[in-house]
Amino acid sequence: MRHNPFPRSGQPVSELGFGAMGFAGWFGEQQESEWIDSLLYALEQGVSFVDTARAYGDSERVVGKALQQWSGTRPFVATKVEQLAGQTGWGTPVDPKLAHPPGHIRASAERSLTELGLDYVDLIQLHIWWPTWGVRGHWMDELQQLKQDGLVRHIGISIPDHRSDMALPLVESGLIDSVQTIINIFDPIALDNLVPACQQNGVAVVARCVLDEGGLTGTLTEDTVFAEDDFRYGYFDDIVPRSVYLEKVDALREYVPRYASSLAALALKFVTQPAGVTTAITSMHVREFCQANIAAVGEPELPAEIHDLLRFKHRFIKNFNETKIFREYR
């Protein structure tokens, strides 16, 4: 497992991060013991970055329970402040005093520490930040105070959807340590502007949705059905016909197995390879996923010309987040 330095501290973090959103049960139910086993397995294999959130159901508690059983070096633990605005606030800008009323950020962080069983977290992120908030305000003051009080080591934000350039002013302000954003073969836009800006300003980049919610694994078919309570329900169907999506996936098969052992491996290598991407998180709540993802990043890197082909030839820009947010208007 290769590691990259977290820019502001230099602490090594694994290029592949453990995304613990699956511990919320949104990708189908599993036994809690299976989730814990999967996280412990990942840690044993050198994964040292764990990402969870206050909004992910019992995820923080499960992560904390696993950490209690872990006797190795403590991993880099990141979580997110739960925002209080409704679903409309997720898809469109909302008043920061509604999303994070004064005192809420600290209360959320303290609850996270309790659930995780930790004295501090390595990174706390706003689960939502909008450029309409500017770069200063009560929310920034509260984040900075958490650092001063030793409850968190780093602060950052998570970009709500695919529009990664919205975070450029905050990155350039020097006030944050990390940005989490969508990066994958179909949507590499963050590599154009955001990632270089983060490199220039010493800000970490946490890539998410690197497998496009599983679409880039090659396992999705016309007949795949997701339950209504599954996070992916409607995700691949409302913006474009599923057949169009599958055609785009099929076009990637020419690179397998010559440059990657599988489509999923191709997608993971694409995101973990660029300089400036600190870590790429993917859901690994199932041990089988852990094994496959860890094996993938252990493969040889993609040739530069192949990475460029994937980045520029196979762009398929769409905002699937609109499926979840604006479905009532369709």
Image (spheres, grey):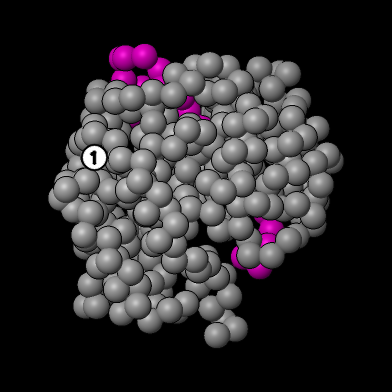
Question: x%, y% of residue 318?
Answer: 50, 68
- Alpha-carbon neighbours of circle 1 within 10 Å: few (<14), some, or many (≥20)? many
- Dividing the image into 4 quarters, which one contains the C terminus? bottom right
- Is residue 55 visible to us here? no
Highlighted range, magenta: 64-89
Could you say which is closer to the camera, residue 103 or residue 245? 245
Residue topped by disc 1: 296
Above or below 287: residue 2: above
Above or below 89: residue 15: above
Residue 312: image quadrant is bottom left
Residue 21 forms part of the magenta stretch: no
Question: x%, y% of residue 109?
Answer: 62, 33
Question: x%, y% of residue 328?
Answer: 57, 81
Q: Amino acid at mark 1?
A: Ala
Q: Residue at x 47, y 33 (%)?
A: 275
Above or below 198: residue 146: above
Residue 70 forms part of the magenta stretch: yes
Q: Residue at x 24, y 78 (%)?
A: 222
Disc 1, SS:
helix
Q: Residue furthest front?
A: 305
Residue 42: image quadrant is top left
Q: Residue at x 68, y 47 (%)?
A: 167
